[in-house]
Image (tube, helix red, strand yellow):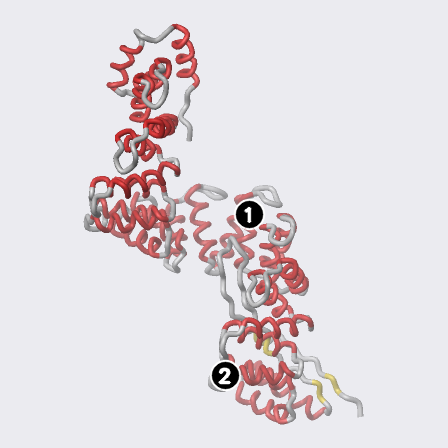
């Protein structure tokens, strides 16, 4: 008697767990194989039993399906073991039990069932039903991937990409992503797009990234829709097209993608690809902010602080700043510090000002570093310390904050918190003056006039006092009258040319 081989529709159920990392990097999407009652039968009766089980699954009658599996379980058939594992894993007709799922996946996987190997790898990777063991996950993913399971190929690629359980190997990551992507695995298509987008392990290729994003996006993958929107917005691999970018952002946003929601809000806020609409921007910022998207929380705080798209509400602004600040958003930390400093939406509190300013300052926000330096210099909310004031002023100055540069110059000029150094003072006065700091311009002129930290230079004094005087500095205007009587014609000619050509440097 001929053996009857029955092919089953394996699209009935799909179990996929996913974890998403930053979209600027690859999305870590852990995928699981499908529930598929697939068995090679030795008799028409067995085939009918299987068909009954399949119909039971389609009806959601998992108890009957379980009964139909039992004969095959007694025979030790890996297909039955695999499907029982999936039922335990999802609580389909039986109480959910990850340990039992692990047991049955293991039995099926050891007999070579590719889907079981893939899901067993996923359990090991996540530590579900067993202790986490990334090396074991690699082993089972590899066995399944070698048999062509696209979800295993994608997950194995992720491990190679991040160097988890194996040495990082982007070349192998690309290999496995490509194999999975060409089989239509949408997570692999998106991940392969990101590798090509960012040039990780392969030459950067926006056009190919666009192709893979598009394939995944057309299948409804929200992350790919978002990434495709970014390429269209930036004009990478395709002509810049804000209107089409908004279409993809909207599709992703409507699926709950918080980054797409935040980006969509920004597009409406700035009128890119759509009519400028602050109310719509607020709507999308709220959608993303309520789900914890940090940038959206910060931007929503700004909208409430400034009364843009919503009635001004400083208390609500402070609330959103704090939520973003607690997630480490430096700009939110700084703004929250300023609100505590001025008692806007929160009680005035110098210690809280220092607390949040320091958090932002540590992350390199120059204006927060400057504010913190002033707090230390004046002993506000913290014990006075000129040394710490000078240290933070130096950081802010290196961050190109002109006010900090002027103050740091003054500290060096007077030897406060640092060793007195006229040349260093001259340097920072010059940096501040170039950016348009009027006090820096006046003091730089004085250094040139008196020859402090530099040879005496009436031309330099004349130039910088002229620039400051033109901007309304009274002292510079008076000093200019003095130096004008002492400057040589040649120095005056050079200074005049400098004044005419001078513009503030960013």
Give the percent coordinates (x, y) of residue 215: 63, 57
Looking at the figure, which quarter contains the C terminus? Answer: top left
Can you say which quadrant of the picture contains the N terminus?
A: bottom right
Q: Which numbered circle lies on residue 244?
A: 1
Q: Residue at x 27, y 33 (%)?
A: 415
Question: In this view of the protein, which residue sits in the foreground, 286 or 499?
Answer: 499
Q: Position of residue 444 (x, y in %)?
A: 33, 23
At horizontal 38% and vertical 45% (from top left) the residue drawn is 364
Residue 441 lies, in percent from the top left, at 33, 23
Reply above or below: 225 against 447.
below
Q: Is residue 407 visible?
A: no
Measured Cα–Cα span from mark 1 to mark 2 = 47 Å
Which residue is label 2 attached to? 99
Q: Closer to the observer: label 1 or label 2?
A: 2
Q: Quadrant of residue 453?
A: top left
- Quarter location, residue 495: top left
- Tell me: residue 107, above or below residue 233: below
Rendered position, 222 above or below 237:
below
Q: Residues within 10 Å of mark 1 (few under 14, many from 20)?
A: some
Q: Earlier in the sequence, mark 1 or mark 2?
A: 2
Q: Residue at x 53, y 85 (%)?
A: 61
Q: x, y (%) of residue 98?
A: 49, 81
In this picture, residue 88 sits left or right of residue 428: right
- The answer to the question of whether label 1 and label 2 lie on touching residues, with beta carbons closer than 8 A, is no
């Amino acid at each position: 008697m001929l053996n009857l081989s029955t092919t089953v529709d394996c699209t009935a159920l799909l179990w996929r767990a996913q974890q998403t990392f930053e979209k600027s990097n690859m999305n870590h999407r852990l995928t699981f194989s499908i529930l598929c009652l697939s068995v090679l039968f030795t008799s028409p009766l067995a085939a009918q039993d299987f068909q009954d089980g399949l119909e039971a699954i389609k009806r959601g009658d998992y108890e009957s399906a379980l009964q139909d599996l039992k004969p095959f379980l007694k025979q030790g058939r890996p297909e039955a073991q695999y499907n029982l594992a999936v039922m335990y894993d999802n609580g389909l007709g039986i109480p959910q039990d990850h340990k039992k799922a692990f047991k049955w996946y293991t039995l099926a996987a050891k007999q070579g069932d590719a889907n079981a190997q893939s899901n067993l790898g996923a359990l090991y990777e996540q530590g579900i039903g067993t202790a986490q063991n990334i090396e074991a996950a690699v082993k089972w993913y590899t066995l399944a991937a070698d048999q062509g399971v696209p979800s295993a190929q994608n997950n194995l690629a992720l491990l190679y990409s991040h160097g988890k359980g194996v040495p990082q190997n982007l070349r192998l990551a690309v290999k496995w992503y490509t194999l999975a992507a060409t089989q239509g695995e949408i997570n692999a298509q998106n991940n392969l797009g990101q590798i090509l987008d960012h040039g990780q392990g392969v030459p950067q290729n926006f056009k190919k990234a666009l192709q893979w994003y598009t394939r995944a996006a057309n299948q409804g993958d929200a992350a790919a829709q978002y990434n495709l929107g970014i390429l269209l917005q930036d004009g990478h691999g395709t002509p810049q097209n804000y209107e089409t970018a908004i279409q993809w952002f909207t599709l992703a946003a409507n699926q709950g993608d918080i980054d797409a929601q935040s980006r969509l809000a920004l597009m409406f806020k700035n009128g890119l690809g759509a009519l400028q609409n602050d109310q719509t921007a607020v709507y999308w910022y709220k959608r993303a902010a309520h789900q914890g998207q940090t940038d959206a929380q910060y931007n929503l705080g700004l909208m409430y602080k400034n009364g843009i798209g919503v009635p001004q509400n400083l208390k609500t602004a402070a609330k959103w700043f704090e939520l973003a600040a607690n997630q480490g958003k430096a700009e939110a930390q700084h703004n929250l510090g300023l609100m505590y400093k001025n008692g806007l939406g929160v009680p005035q509190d110098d210690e809280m000002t220092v607390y949040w300013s320091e958090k932002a300052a540590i992350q390199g926000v120059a204006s927060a570093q400057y504010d913190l330096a002033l707090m230390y210099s004046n002993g506000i909310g913290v014990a006075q310390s000129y040394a710490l004031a000078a240290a933070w002023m130096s950081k802010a100055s290196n961050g190109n904050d002109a006010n900090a540069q002027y103050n740091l110059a003054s500290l060096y000029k007077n030897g406060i918190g640092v060793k007195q150094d006229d040349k260093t003072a001259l340097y920072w006065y010059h940096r501040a003056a170039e950016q348009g700091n009027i006090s820096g311009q006046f003091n730089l002129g004085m250094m040139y006039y008196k020859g402090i930290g530099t040879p005496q230079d009436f031309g330099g004094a004349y130039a910088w006092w002229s620039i400051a005087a033109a901007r309304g500095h009274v002292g510079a205007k008076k000093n200019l009258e003095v130096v004008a009587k002492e400057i040589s014609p040649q120095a005056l000619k050079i200074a005049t040319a400098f004044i005419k050509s001078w513009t503030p440097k960013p």
